């Protein structure tokens, strides 16, 4: 009788209210877990980005040890034969560092020989020519920050610092930015009077989205053609120019597409404005001029990391600089011989 009684008893189960309570608890746990997972993933991406910059810092040191100098911010073609150089961006810092980051085969695929113009004695850079199709289309993973999800390819997120002023080339009529990679001028360690550990060499910059400009994007570079600016323009004047609403031209959405080419469009930047500046980057050139020949611009360090950007100092060390860094300190870090005294607790 006892066995029959036990077999006939109804099985217990969760009530509807108990199920809802369990689901609510699971939902709360998931809500708490997702931010933690996202934070962990971004921390991993930040670490990966810093490791990329550390690799490049080591390559800079190896290049200097092997050649007695650092790579130029702009490398011209190698067989000019006394002919005038016409146009087209030169070759980048990244291209010159390839043999020092175990990428010798890719370096050997690059054609550094110039192209003679069919209409005169001029020569043209091969950096963006069909002669370098292979290198132009090759993605180099250590040149991409994993936090930047732009689809532009192959892309380059790391750029050489030309200094604190808007000009790239240092000459009598264009004083340049006074930085580690001032255009055609080749630097060595003895020229860094501020110290290698007090001079920024490389930083991040978001690549463009490609396609038609949508306006208001920190990924774009805008023309401010027609707006008056003193010559040579200083950093404050240029920053004011970029913040001026009137006279704005179209946006350039292809910035940072090619790691092989130099110039402010592709692989150089400056400290005219602060990291992740709310004021959009700009140039004085009209829209119909390719930015590879751009002489000046405000091209800022930008990233998708929360609160700042990564930099590589010329001694190879990597630092995270907050967006709130004082602009005079940010600019002082960009000069190789400005005479500024900057403490490590100031950035």
Image (cartoon, helix red, strand yellow):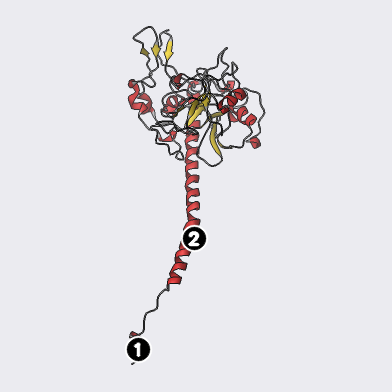
Instruction: Identify the residue at horizontal 33%, vertical 25% (top origin).
Output: 133
Q: How many C-alpha atoms fall within 10 Å of the one at disc 1: few (<14), some, or many (≥20)?
A: few
Q: Residue 300's x, y, as percent?
A: 53, 30
Q: Secondary structure at mark 1?
A: helix
- For the residues labelled 1 and 2, the Cα–Cα distance comes to 42 Å
Residue 31's place in the image compared with 142, above or below, is below
Report x, y in % for residue 218. Answer: 50, 33
Residue 89, position as x, y percentages in the image: 43, 20
Q: How many marks?
A: 2
Earlier along the polypeptide chain: callout 1 or callout 2? 1
**Is 190 rendered above or below residue 18?**
above
- Find numbered disc 2 in the image and state the secondary structure of the residue it sits on: helix
Identify the residue at horizontal 56%, vertical 15% (top origin). Answer: 174
Q: Residue 59: tell me if it is visible.
A: no
Residue 87 is marked as none
Is residue 146 placed above or below 119 in the rendered structure? below
User: The C terminus is located in which quarter?
Assistant: top right
Image quadrant assignment for residue 259: top left
Q: Which mark is residue 28?
A: 2
Mark 1 or 2: in front is: 2
Q: Quadrant of residue 253?
A: top left
| The N terminus lies in quadrant | bottom left
The residue singled out by tag 1 in the image is 5
Identify the residue shown where x is 57% and y is 26%: 244
Could you say which is closer to the camera, residue 264 or residue 51? Answer: 264
Q: Label 2: how many residues lie within 10 Å, few (<14), some (14-19) or many (20+)?
A: few
């Amino acid at each position: 009788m006892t066995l029959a009684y036990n077999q006939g008893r109804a099985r217990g189960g969760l009530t509807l209210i108990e199920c809802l309570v369990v689901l609510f608890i699971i939902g709360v746990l998931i809500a708490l877990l997702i931010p933690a997972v996202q934070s962990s993933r971004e921390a991993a991406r930040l670490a990966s980005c810093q490791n990329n910059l550390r690799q490049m810092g080591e390559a800079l040191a190896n290049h200097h040890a092997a050649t007695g100098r650092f790579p130029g911010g702009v490398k011209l073609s190698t067989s000019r034969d006394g002919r005038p150089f016409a146009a087209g961006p030169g070759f980048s810092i990244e291209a010159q560092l390839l043999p020092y980051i175990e990428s010798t085969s890719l370096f050997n695929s690059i054609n550094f020989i110039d192209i003679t113009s069919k209409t005169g004695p001029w020569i043209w850079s091969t950096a963006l020519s069909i002669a370098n199709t292979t290198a132009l289309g090759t993605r180099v993973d250590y040149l991409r920050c994993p936090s930047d999800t732009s689809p532009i390819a192959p892309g380059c997120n790391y750029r050489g610092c030309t200094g604190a002023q808007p000009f790239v080339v240092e000459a009598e009529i264009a004083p340049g930015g006074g930085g580690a990679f001032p255009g055609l001028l080749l630097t060595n360690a003895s020229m860094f009077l501020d110290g290698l550990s007090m001079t920024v060499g490389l930083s991040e910059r978001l690549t463009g989205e490609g396609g038609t400009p949508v306006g208001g994007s920190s990924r774009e570079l805008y023309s401010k053609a027609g707006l008056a600016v003193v010559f040579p323009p200083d950093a404050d004047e240029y920053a004011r120019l970029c913040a001026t609403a009137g006279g704005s031209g179209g946006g350039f959405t292809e910035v940072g597409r090619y790691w092989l080419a130099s110039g402010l469009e592709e692989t150089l930047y400056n400290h005219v404005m602060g990291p992740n500046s709310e004021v959009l980057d700009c140039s004085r050139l009209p829209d119909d001029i390719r930015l590879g020949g751009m002489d000046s611009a405000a091209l800022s360090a930008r990233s998708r990391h929360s609160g700042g950007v990564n930099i590589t100092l010329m001694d190879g060390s990597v630092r995270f600089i907050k967006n709130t860094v004082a602009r005079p300190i940010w600019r002082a870090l960009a000069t190789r011989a400005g005479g500024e005294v900057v403490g490590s607790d100031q950035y």
